[in-house]
Amino acid sequence: MTTAQQRLLAAATSFVALGTAMLLRSGTALGSRLFMNEELAHGQSRGVEITLAWLLVACIPAAWFVRTRAIAASVVLVVVTALAWATQDQGGYPYSAWAMPAQAMRMAAPLALLLISLGWGKARGSLPQESFALWIVRLATVTVFAVHGTEALRAHPFFVDLTITSVRELLDIRITQSATERLLAVVGVIDIAAALALLLTRSRAVVLWMAQWGLFTALLRIAAYGPGTMGEVIVRMPHALLPLVLLPLAAPMRSSDNPAKSRVATTSQTPVHPDVGSRSSAAPPIAPSVRARV
């Protein structure tokens, strides 16, 4: 794994840590779980969330140093996984049962960073070109796009509201719910197709599409609901960064796709007659009349 890929994983882990810390300070399903199921006092459950938030903030600089990377990634992975599990367990909103797979990229970033720190960044066994850590990133990206695509096809109420509000705020256009659901159906098909393409191919276009779409949908929350959703935006930055981790593995553009390069390659590969080089370097033959005079 290259240095650039490791930095992207460290950046994704840092964003997850910061975004999750902001969510914990506002109150999450983890606090509700501690209060309702574990029967902790409200103040104690909030204290746990605040403590975890500050712990995650401390992990942000630690994720960038080799000696502390494994510890920081482990802490972020445990907290994010616990929050995703609590969200799925508590429920209370549509498709909450899909919280774990829907947040797979948040967990994949620190997990891949941890595997690299433990020496799993090299290719192993039957994976000659991709390490185990990169396969974690690939499968998590496929999972999130497939889940979100399915939710869009089923007209997830939050996606419907986000789309209607965003279009109104950005374009000053009011669209009906039926039109929004048709638009989401198209988005869902594209998301699922991109997930399948990433799983089965190494298309550079697919990777770049996923990165820009992940960034766009994350930032859309600010346009729709204002800066108060900054935590939700930051915690989704892996949706834009993790596809870029896979970019060096994507298939390069073929020379046949570039006419200029194709002509140069054809010219440079034109075979040369073996006698041409020897004739150009040898002295010209002496005419018979000249030989007679000599």
Image (cartoon, rainbow, N blue to C red):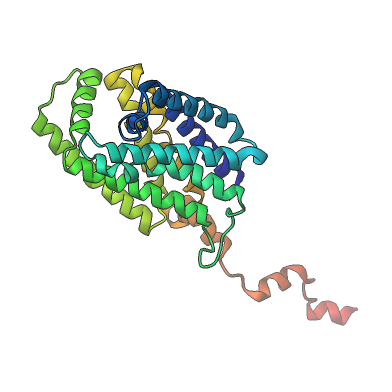
Is residue 125 depicted above or below 192 in this figure?
Answer: below
Residue drawn at (19%, 27%), measured in percent from left and top? 161
Closer-to-camera residue (125/29): 29
What is the quadrant of residue 181 in the picture? Answer: top left
Percent of width and height locating residue 155:
16, 38
Q: In this rendering, does residue 244 appear at all?
A: no
What is the quadrant of residue 41 in the picture? Answer: top left
Q: In this rendering, does residue 125 appear at all?
A: yes
Closer-to-camera residue (150/32): 32
Residue drawn at (48%, 50%), measured in percent from left and top? 260
Percent of width and height locating residue 264:
53, 55
Closer-to-camera residue (107/79): 79
Percent of width and height locating residue 135:
46, 55
Is residue 268 depicted above or below 188 in this figure?
Answer: below
Picture quarter with the C terminus:
bottom right
Please state the total of marks drawn on the protein image. 0
Residue drawn at (12%, 25%), measured in percent from left and top? 175
